[in-house]
Every structure is written in structure tokens, then in C-alpha cells.
Amino acid sequence: MTPNVADILIEALPYIRYFSGMTLVVKYGGNAMVDEQLKEDFARDITLMKFIGLHPVVVHGGGPQINKVLERMGISPRFVRGMRFTDQETMDVVEMVLGGKVNKSIVAQINRQGGKSVGLTGKDGGLLQAEKLQIMHQPDENKPPEILDPGLVGRVTSVNTELISSLSAQGFIPVIAPVGVGAAGETFNINADLVASRVAGSLKSGRLIYLTDVDGLMDARGNLVTSVDAPTVTQMIREGTISGGMIPKLEYALDALENGVEKVQIINGTKRHALLLELFTDQGIGTQVTAQAGTEK
């Protein structure tokens, strides 16, 4: 062991001590779910976190995998205001891919690294209760808003935290596919970022971590913002500094903070061992979002 390696371990010690016993929700998606090396790294990182006393909960996406199956079936993906239009045929594919292939692949990866993982969809044990999502769209301020129908797309109304906490307490790592169930038993496709936010808020988790394909939040000059508070995020959205797909992710982050999550971290999941670098080093690698200014890592 070289002195450099020893220094890294010493640097990690206070963070390991601080995070021990804490629940962390990790939203897993993007290229980190496609690249084989990154998939293995993620499974190792999550397993390590569990063994040193943290309680990770994984929520995953799977858009590219869904698109591949739809393409093979001759079904063209449709999107409504950035959300996948989900008719019954598409919903069947979504449930099959997310709850089956993708979910069980992640579970298997973690188990191969020595962890104990359990795969769930929102339908298992009533984990994610949901209702149909209504999208209000007003293209012209002089015209009344219109309601757009995205099909079987839902929003989370409640989370069965008892199920998650029970599994975590027994040493398992829950891996959740973003499929919810309605009051009449209908199945809903739900945005994974939204599910991660609602799960984290319901668990009052210490951290919500979004793995993305970018380094984090950038300022107007293109520089990485290492730490930002909720009022500043709101202002950056209003000024147009934050745009595109980062807007809903940060809106979900703010919602999680309002519901009791201590901090939200947005990091680049295409970097090897991104989770460990963010949590257990002094500098971290991404953007930390807090409810108010002056909060340290």
C-alpha cells in the first residue's frame, strides 16, 4: 500500500463515520447503465456502501432499453412535452423491460459483488401508489391552458416506506423500478427522477443522489457549481441559466428538500466510482443542492 492510497483511506474515514446508518436514495440511469465497466463499478460502490454501514436504496430508469424493445416490435416512441406517451401496448413493454430485464440485471450485478439485493416495482407490496398525470400546457398566454394526455403516465401519491425500511434493516439493498399502481389496480409509467425524489422525501433520507451524464449544474459561464441553495436554483431557472432536462431534475431536487431530504447531489455517473468520489472525498465531484446557503458537505 502506497502512502497515497493510505491518505485516501484516511480522508474517507470521517465521511464513513458521518454517513454510517444513513439512508441514501440513488437514482441510477444514463450511460452508467449501459457501459459494462460502469455497471460493475456501480454495483461495487453500492455494495461497499452497504458493508460500511450506509443504507442505499436504488431507483433506476431504462429509457434506451425500452426504446430498443419498442423498435424490435415496430412501435415508434412518442413523447408529450418530454414524457413518453404510454398507451397500453407501450405500458406492457415498459413494465416488462423495467420490472424484468433492467431491474433483475441490476440486482444480479449487486449480488455478484457480494451484496444482498432485492428487485421491486411500485406494484410490489403497494410500494408506489400513483394516479394519472395531467399535463397543463399554455403555448399562448392569451389562450386558456390545455390539458395534454400522456396516456398511462403517473405521479406518485404515496410510498410504502415500511417495506423499504424493513428490507434495509435486514441487510438488503432495494432496487426499485419506476412503475406504480393506481387505486383501481391500473399500472402507470412514472419518471424515475420523480420516483427517486418521492422515495427520498418519504424516507426522509440524508441524501438523494442523481447519477447523470454531465458533471453537474453549470453556471452562466459554463463552470461547475459545486454547491447551491434552493433560492439560487429557483433564480437560475427564472433567468434561463438552467435549461432543458436539468430543469425537471432540479425541480424534483427542490421538492425532495422541501419534504425532509437533507441534501441532493447531482454527479456524473460516467466517471468510474462516482458515488465514492462524491461521498468520501473532501472535494467531491458534482453539485450539492441544499435548502439554504452555508451548509457544508
Image (cartoon, rainbow, N blue to C red):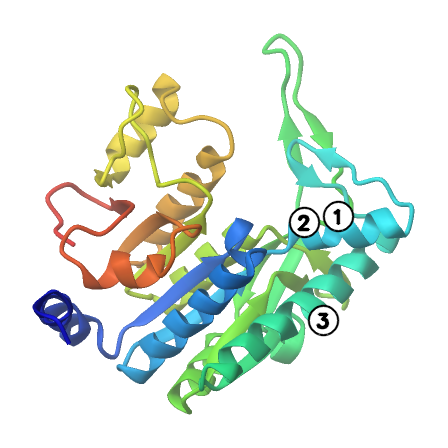
Which amino acid lies under the numbered mark 2 shown in the image of this protein?
Pro
Image mark for residue 67: 1
Can residue 181 be seen in the rendering of this structure? no
Question: At numbered mark 3, what does the secondary structure look like: helix, strand or loop?
Answer: helix
Name the quarter where the C terminus is drawn: bottom left
Rendering coords of residue 87 (x, y %): 84, 48
Q: Residue furthest right?
A: 74
- Residue 64's label in the rendered image is 2
Question: Between 76 and 249, which is closer to the camera in this rendering?
Answer: 76
Q: Position of residue 128 (x, y in %)?
A: 59, 67
Q: CA distance from mark 1 to mark 3?
A: 15 Å
* Left or right of 199 on screen, residue 66: right
Residue at position x 18%, y 59% in the image: 281
* Front-lying residue, 156 or 288: 288
Q: CA distance from mark 2 to mark 1?
A: 5 Å
- Work out whether residue 232 or residue 2 is closer to the camera in this orientation and state it: 2
Q: Which amino acid is tagged 1?
A: Asn
Query: Which residue is label 3 attached to?
Result: 100
Number of other residues with Cα within 10 Å of mark 1, as a class: few under 14, some 14 to 19, many 20 or more: some
Asked if the residue at tag 1 contacts the one at tag 2, i.e. Cβ–Cβ closer than 8 Å, the answer is: yes
Q: Is 104 drawn above or below residue 28 in the view shown?
A: below
